[in-house]
Amino acid sequence: MDLDRGKPVWPQVAEELRRRIEAGTYPAGERFPAVVTLAAELDVAPSTVQKAVTALRSEGLLYTVLGAGSYVSR
């Protein structure tokens, strides 16, 4: 993923993850990858991915099951 380091990174990460959800890379009802996994894959800090995941959750694209992780909404 090419990041524009002159702009805030978390919205760019959120947009990439949103694209992946819409493309079916992360299918509805399936568990979403862990923050640390995505951070390593995207070469960003885990806190950056967490902020992006929080934004996607507020948009209704993800939901969290306490103790089980995040899932893609149907």
Image (cartoon, grey):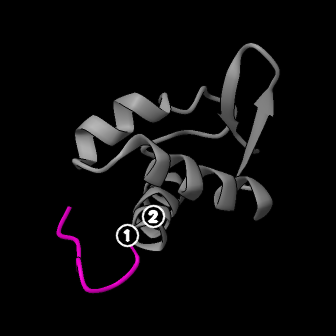
Give left or right: position of 27 versus 45: right
| Location of residue 28 with respect to 69 vertically, above or below | below
- Residue furthest to the top: 67
Helix, strand or loop under label 2: helix
Local crowd size for mark 2, using a 10 Å CA cut-off: few (<14), some (14–19), many (≥20): few
Q: Position of residue 5 (x, y in %)?
A: 23, 77
Q: Earlier in the sequence, mark 1 or mark 2?
A: 1
Give the residue number, with chain letter if any, for mark 1.
Answer: 9
Give the residue number, with chain letter if any, for mark 2.
Answer: 19
Q: CA distance from mark 1 to mark 2?
A: 16 Å
Q: Position of residue 15 (x, y in %)?
A: 46, 69
Q: How many tags in the picture?
A: 2
Foreground residue among 29 and 48: 48
* Image quadrant in which the C terminus is located: top right
Q: Magenta segment, principal secondary structure?
A: loop
Tell me which segment is drawn in magenta: 1-8
Q: Position of residue 9 (x, y in %)?
A: 37, 69
* Image quadrant in which the N terminus is located: bottom left
Q: Amino acid at mark 2?
A: Arg
Give left or right: position of 10 versus 52: left
Residue 5 drawn in magenta: yes
Local crowd size for mark 1, using a 10 Å CA cut-off: few (<14), some (14–19), many (≥20): some
Give left or right: position of 55 versus 44: right
Q: Amino acid at mark 1?
A: Val
Which residue is depicted at the point 50% across and 63% down? 14
Give left or right: position of 37 versus 33: left
Which residue is depicted at the point 47% across and 34% down? 35
Which residue is depicted at the point 76% across and 13% down? 67
Q: Quadrant of residue 23?
A: bottom left
Residue 26 drawn in magenta: no
- Mark 1 or 2: the one toward you: 1
Q: Quadrant of residue 8?
A: bottom left
